[in-house]
Image (cartoon, rainbow, N blue to C red):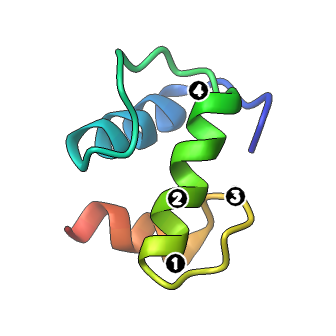
Amino acid sequence: KIGSASSAVATLQNRLIALGYLTGKADGIFGANTDKALRAYQTAKVLTADGICGKNPWTALLTK
C-alpha cells in the first residue's frame, strides 16, 4: 500500500511495468503512480481495486 518500501514493492513495480500498467523504473517505493497502476491492473483483472496487493493480485501478477 502507499508508503511501503521494499524489494517486494520493486517486484510488484517490475511486473506492472512488464504488463504495461506502469512506466519508468522500479524504485521499491509504493507511491501514487504505483497505486494508480495497481488499481488499473486490479480493475482489468476483475479484482477488488483497493490498491493493496494481497494474495489474489500477487497470484495473478506472478502467474501471467
- Could you tell me which secondary element the residue under label 1 belongs to? helix
Q: Mark 4 or mark 1: name the one nearer the start of the chain.
A: 4
What's the CA distance linking mark 1 and mark 2? Answer: 15 Å
What's the CA distance linking mark 3 and mark 4? Answer: 14 Å
Q: Is residue 35 left or right of residue 15?
A: right
Asked if disc 4 and disc 2 are in contact, CB closer than 8 Å, the reply is: no
Query: Residue placed at 48% from the left, 14% from the top?
Result: 27
- Could you tell me which secondary element the residue under label 3 belongs to? loop
Amino acid found under the numbered disc labelled 3? Ile
Q: Is residue 14 above or below residue 64?
A: above
Mark linked to residue 33: none
What's the CA distance linking mark 1 and mark 3? Answer: 10 Å
Q: Label 3: which residue?
A: 52
Q: Is residue 19 above or below residue 39?
A: above
Q: Give x and y (percent) for residue 1.
A: 74, 45
Mark linked to residue 40: 2
Badge nearest the viewer, 3 or 4: 3
- Could you tell me which secondary element the residue under label 4 belongs to? loop
Q: Mark 4 or mark 2: name the one nearer the start of the chain.
A: 4
Q: Give x and y (percent) for residue 23.
A: 35, 26
